[in-house]
Structures are given as C-alpha cells and as structure tokens.
Amino acid sequence: MHEMHEIPRNNRERALLVGMVPSKERVGEMEESLDELALLADTAGAEIVDRIIQVRSAMHPAYYIGTGKARSIAELCEAEQIELVIFDDDLTPAQVRNLDRVIERRILDRSGLILDIFASRAKSRQAKLQVELAQLQYMMPRLTRQWDHLSRQEGGVAAGSGGAIGVRGPGETQLEIDRRLTRGRITHLRRNLEQVTASYNRQRQRRSAMFCIALIGYTNAGKSTIFNGFTEADTLIEDRLFATLDATTRAVNVTPGQPVLLSDTVGFIRKLPHHLIASFKSTLTEVYDADLLVHVVDGSHPNHADHIVTVNQVLAELGASHLPLLLVYNKADQLESPDALEFLKLSYPDAIAISALDPGDVERLRQEISIRVDRQRVEVELLIPYENGHAVSVAYESGDVLRREDEPEGVRLTVRMMPSVAGRLGKTLDAFVCG
Ligand SMILES: Nc1nc2c(ncn2[C@@H]2O[C@H](COP(=O)(O)OP(=O)(O)OP(=O)(O)O)[C@@H](O)[C@H]2O)c(=O)[nH]1
Ligand SMILES: [Mg+2]
C-alpha cells in the first residue's frame, strides 16, 4: 500500500530493541513482542539494527536490565552507531535516567514510542488534543522525579560544603515553573477537549435513533478495509500500525430498510499506554455506545489469540465487555491451510471467517450482521404526542412499524426495533415507551 509518512531509509534513526524475561521458556514470547515493537519502531521511523533479550529473574529496580548488560549495550551502541534504545516494557522514570547515564543514548519505552506514533499521526483537532494530553500526563512524573534526583544529587554534594540552598534554589524554581506550565497546559487541553467533545456529541445525538455498529480490533486487522468495503469510503488503509486514529462513521444499508451507522475505530495493541486509553475515551464513545461490536481479528497472524485477549482487556477497561459482539476472522485468504480455519472455529464457534478483499465475503459479513441486528430487535409500543410528528417519522425510519393507532393522547405505534434505540427515542424525542 501507499505510505503517507515514508521516511527515507538513510534518514532513519538507528535503533536497538531490548526485552527482558524471567526465564528461558519465555524467550519465544518476548521474540513475538519484539516483532511487534519492531513494527512500532518502523512506523515511528526507526531502522532496527539489533535486538537483545535478557533472561533475568527480576528486573533491576534502578536499571531494569542488569548493570553488566547495560554496559554491554553501551558498547554495542558505540560500535554500531545506534542512536536510540527502545525497551519493550515500561521503564520507571528513574530507570530511564540511570540507563541514559550508562548508555548515553536516547532511551525510550513502549508507551513513549506508541505516544510518539499517535502524536505524529493525529489529524483531527480532537485526536491532537487527546494525544498531547496523554503525552503530558506521561511526562509529568518523569519531569518531577528527574528533578528530584538532580536536586538530591546536587544537594548531597552541596550539603557537605554547606551551600545546599543556593544550589537547589534556582533548580527548584525552574522545576516549579515546569510543573506549573505543564499543569496549566493540561487544564487548558482538558477544557478544549470537553468543548470539542460536547459539539461532537451533539452531532451524534442527532443520529442517536439509529442502530450503531463499531468495527473494533487489533491494529492492522483489516477494520478499515472492511469499512471501505461496506461504505465505498476512502479511509486510509495501510500495512502499518495505527493507520486509523479518528473514528469515521457512515450510514450503511445492512438490513433491508434499516440503515445503521457503522464506525471504523482506532486499533488496539498490547501494552497500550493507560493515559492514552483514558484520553481517547471520548473518541471511543463509538465503541462503548455501540449496539453491536464487530471484532475484527487477523486470523492469519500467529498471535491472533493474544490479540483477542488484548482487545477484550481494552474493552473491559472501556466498560464495553457486556455489548453484543460478532467475532470476525479476517485475512482468511492468507491462512496456511483450511485446517487452520477449523482450529480457529474451535475456540469461537460463533465467529465467521472472511477475506475483506473478497466482495462475496463482505456480502456474507453483511448478512451475518443483519441477522445479529434483527436478533436484537424487540417489539415496543410508543405513544407519541401529536405535536411531536418528528418522532413518528423517526420511528418509521429506525424500525418496522407493525401497527398504528391514532388515540386521543397521540399516535400509538407498535414497532419492531432495538430496545436501546427505543430508549434513546423516548429520551430525545419525547415519545413514551410503553412496553
Ligand atoms: N491478504 C489480506 N490482506 C488484508 C485483508 N484485509 C486487510 N488486509 C490488509 O491488511 C492491512 C491492514 O488493513 P487496514 O484495513 O488498514 O487495518 P486496520 O485494522 O484498519 O488497521 P489500523 O487502522 O492500523 O488499526 C492492509 O495492508 C490491508 O490491505 C484480507 O482479508 N486479506
Ligand atoms: Mg484502520
């Protein structure tokens, strides 16, 4: 696929990947995690020079890896002109600082890397605000503790000579300024984000009588490809991580006579920084307000089972675990053998397997979704006051009207529709839901 942010090969920062595992048996697992870290680093514009896995029963509190290992990494960086060392797990601010001193290269952890990618990919105002907020929150403790360390060190030296206050004074002032600026910026971003989110929610509300479906899943699973297959939209599709950051929503005809809203959403990934999930909550309303989640899995990926677990964890964090869900194994065309499919089906018998590149398969998915939509519909009775003619037309649009009676209080409709849609209709359009 065509790449939007291609960085010329020779301008790429040379990077080393580092992982740590408690025992030899888990090296394979770490290899897979580093494969993914390599993809992330590539997306961010790095050239991977080498990777190192250390087996160590517990992390070193001050250096994460062992100190001997840290020194050998320093030598490797020197020999290979490595500029950036990326750790697969999150480091504490103190570990970053200590490693920085030994290795003398830029140190980054997985969260920092993901935040960096999000920052360079954010396009909408909302996404930009969300990413900056998450970055500042990520930086805040690092800012503080790094300074604590410096002031302690200088204080220690100075204490002996009796001049601690003079040495620490300006530093602490600078720290206070940094903290205050950061805090101020965070407040400012939060406020802006609230405004953007409010206007966005108003737009959403206008469409709230419709059945909402969200395509969710691990990054690079094929969500946008499916979305484009349904909508003829031209959402960016790339063989890269996090091609999509903003949710895109379109009305599509899934069930005859029942337009639904379909949203394409940001992909999830292992060890997604917590701040990022929190900041992106407003973008992810499409996920936790959905009437149906379509969980797209790259069935041909060797780690697809882990991907499913990760996505389920993020769903839980978003409070969306209870929503009806259809599991879709995508990229069936890339499966090594038909047996693989049978195997996939064993763990999730309700899942369907498709290739998003095959229009026939997309049609099959449409039918499957249509069945799920219909399964969720129930008969409800609405009593709509005559002055609220708009609600009557919305009811006709969003469900099958089975019976209509004109009564003194208003129009009584028996409609087959989604209970959640009926609920929203009652709230926003002043119709009374009777049963
Ligand atoms: N072979 C094959 N490739 C597919 C299929 N579906 C998607 N792809 C490819 O997989 C890559 C990722 O597709 P996207 O649709 O961008 O994936 P996504 O889930 O939206 O990814 P993010 O937006 O990054 O979370 C692209 O190169 C697609 O062309 C499929 O069924 N078969
Ligand atoms: Mg996408």
Image (spheres, rainbow, N blue to C red):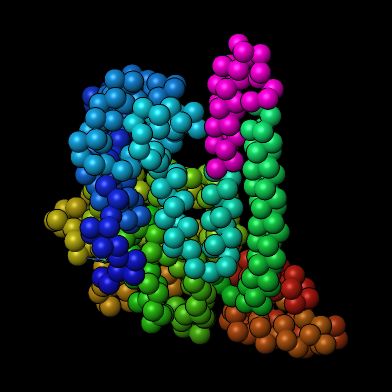
Residue placed at 41% from the left, 48% from the top? 113
Q: Does the magenta stretch include residue 131?
A: no
Q: Image check: 74 left or right of 130?
A: left
The magenta stretch spans residue 165: yes
In the rendered image, residue 367, in percent from the top left (x then y), is placed at: 38, 74
Which residues lie in the magenta part? 139-167
Residue at the far top in the pictured view: 160
Residue 4 visible, this orientation = yes
Across and down, in percent, residue 342 comes to 22, 53
In this picture, is 333 found above or below 95? below
Q: Please tell me which residue lies in front, 86 or 124.
A: 86
Residue at the spot 48% in from the left edge and 63% down from the top edge:
122
Q: Quadrant of residue 199?
A: bottom right
Q: State whether the magenta stretch is mostly helix, strand or loop.
A: helix
Give ligand 1's quarter of the image.
bottom left
Residue 130 x, y percent position in the rendering: 57, 57
**Which of 391/101 is in front?**
101
Compared to residue 94, the image places residue 36 above or below, namely below
> Looking at the image, is 335 positioned above or below residue 424?
above
In the picture as drawn, the residue positioned furthest to the left comes out as 337
Q: In the image, is residue 19 above or below residue 397?
A: above
Instruction: Please provide percent x and percent y for residue 262.
Output: 48, 72
Residue 152's image quarter? top right
Front residue (pair 276, 399): 276
Q: Residue at x 65, y 38 (%)?
A: 174
Residue at left offset 64%, top offset 47%: 182
Tell me the quarter of the image containing the N terminus: bottom left
Q: Using the rendered image of the protein, determine whether residue 201 is visible from the camera's viewpoint.
A: no
Q: Quadrant of the C terminus?
A: bottom right
Q: How many labels does the image show?
A: 0
